[in-house]
Amino acid sequence: ASINKWLPALRVESRTQNNYRAAVVQLFNYAQKTMKALPHWLPHAAEEAIKVQEPAKDTEIYGPEEMQKILKAASPQLAPLIALRAFSGIRNEETWGLDWGEIDLERNVIKLKSSVTKLSQRRVMPLLPNLKAWLLQVSHREGRVAAGYKSAKTLSEAITNVIIGAGVAPKRNALRNSYTSYRLAVHAEVGKVAEETGNSPAVIKSEYLELV
């Protein structure tokens, strides 16, 4: 009951409130299973805390003019990483963990290892001409692609700062959303785009179909 009172009192967005709930559940799980501080045969208070429904949000993308501004404002170090996000649909965490050895500039494919992808499944994506042109500007193509950033969070923050500096409003997941939407508009093959982006066909249909 106390947790159910505390969570709404935070006065944060639904997603953030659920994230707080998840953190408390993990803490109670640790106390129960590792510290043996709670009876293991009973559900603990955190598990019974109510998870609020998160309102659906429209899928946001960047238009061509916005992308031009963003890439123009980026440093030579960061511009290829932004291009990678916008022109391949790769996730931020996947970008941070990506190695140059997984980018095949001859066969024009990007091969993500299962240890890098969100779903822990190997994924092969096309290396499109516009993205290849950006990557070829990088002189040192060894090791991690985002070697200059100590975490996926710092990479994401750096990209957000560039977007703001370019006079463009930051939009949640918009780089990845842009690729997915335009790729779907060109090919109109839901299954193909789902496979390339590591999404389900259902998500592609509900969030990206006829978006551009």
Image (cartoon, helix red, strand yellow):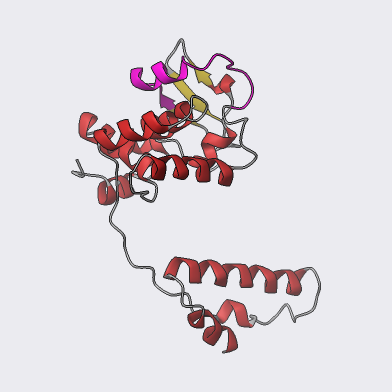
Q: Is residue 27 left or right of residue 192?
A: right
Is residue 189 something that shows in the picture?
A: no
In this view, which residue lies farthest toward the top? 106
**Viewer-nearest residue: 15 or 199:** 15
Quarter assignment of residue 66? top left
Image location (x, y in percent) of residue 122: 52, 33
Q: Where the N terminus falls, by quadrant?
A: bottom right
Boundaries of the magenta span = 125-144
Question: Vertically, is 39 above or below 174?
Answer: below
Residue occupying image coordinates x 43% and y 34%: 85
Image location (x, y in percent) of residue 107: 44, 12
Q: Is residue 134 magenta?
A: yes
Q: Where the C terminus falls, by quadrant?
A: top left
Image location (x, y in percent) of residue 76: 49, 24
Q: Is residue 65 magenta?
A: no
Q: Is residue 35 left or right of residue 195?
A: right
Quarter assignment of residue 210? top left
